[in-house]
Image: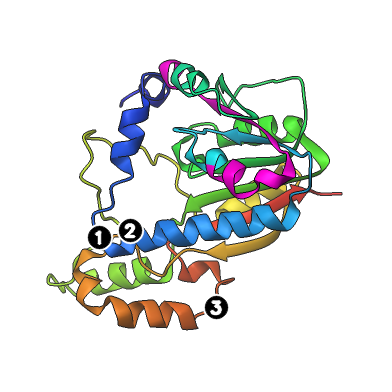
Amino acid sequence: MIDLKKYYMKKEIDSYKNEMYYHNITEAMNQIIRVKSIKLFFGSVVKKGYNVLDLGCGSGSDIINFSETFGSYNLSFIGVDLGRDLVKKLNSLKLKNIKFVNGDIENLYLKQKFDIITELEVAEHLEHFDDNLEVIKKHLKLTGYLIMSCPNKRYLLKDLYALLTKFKRSHIKTIAEHKHEQSQHFDEHINVRSYPEFKRKLENHGFEIVDKRRFMIHFGAKYLEPFYAIVAFVDWLLPKKIMYLGSGYVVLVRLRG
């Protein structure tokens, strides 16, 4: 098994840019919905002068987006990532009010607390999620908020697909197990959790979920593209707060009082 930490230590900006290529419209729409939900939660809690920590920041695209969208709030950002060269290149851009730090988000201490912590599409890559949650707990102010997004291990269309395959419906292609055409030949998602599993993890570490939104009801289903308008309409009609309907979820979290 590949050592994921060593892999991320060597990862550079260009590889993140390559991964932003979406192979079909269902992938692109999931990304749009994810970003929209994250910014909705961020905007609902942010105040002027807040400091923000982004754990597993990758290319820094999320906090750069926050900085541009909420520019009038005079926010300060720190992004943390394992990639040494990545962090060095991001800091060389000299982005206003944004600093990048090389660090392990399962074992980190920055000697300060933050008003908002974001960890987006990261938890499923971590071997020691419990350690990561303790790191978050150490860095989050008592009045602060955590925003996390993750893929969903169990959701309606995935379970439906599993049921149909039992009847050997070979013409029905996989929805939930769609693999991207990435250069690496391994699965980086080593710990994908269903929403109830994820919720229990957070609660066991003293957090509570105060708001939540799901992604689209399907992901990476290329064969559905001809019917995309119908599927998108059905998705729009269905409740956004029932996590079992979505292929991923975004949550707004705080420390339990």
Quickly name the residue at label 1: 24
- Residue reaching furthest right? 257
Residue 58 drawn at (x, y percent): 46, 32
* Closer to viewer: mark 1 or mark 3: 1
Residue 235 drawn at (x, y percent): 43, 77
Q: Which residues are magenta?
A: 65-86
At mark 2, the secondary structure is helix
Residue 186 drawn at (x, y percent): 26, 35
Crowding near the residue tagged with mark 3, few <14, some 14–19, many ≥20 C-alpha atoms within 10 Å? few
- Residue 248 visible? The answer is no
Q: Earlier in the sequence, mark 3 or mark 2?
A: 2
Quickly name the residue at label 3: 239
User: Which amino acid type is shown beneath numbered disc 1?
Assistant: Asn
Quickly name the residue at label 2: 27
Q: Earlier in the sequence, mark 1 or mark 3?
A: 1
The magenta stretch spans residue 174: no
User: Which amino acid type is shown beneath numbered disc 3?
Assistant: Pro
Crowding near the residue tagged with mark 2, few <14, some 14–19, many ≥20 C-alpha atoms within 10 Å? some
Comparing 54 with 130, the one in front is 54
Q: Quadrant of residue 177?
A: bottom left
- Residue reaching furthest left? 171
Quarter holding the N terminus is top left
**Marks 1/3: CA distance?**
24 Å
Q: Are marks 1 and 2 in contact (CB under 8 Å)?
A: yes
Q: Tell me, what colour scheme is on the image?
A: rainbow
Position above or below: 209 against 119: below
For the point 39% across and 41% down, the residue is 189
For the point 23% across and 72% down, the residue is 224
Q: Which mark is residue 57?
A: none
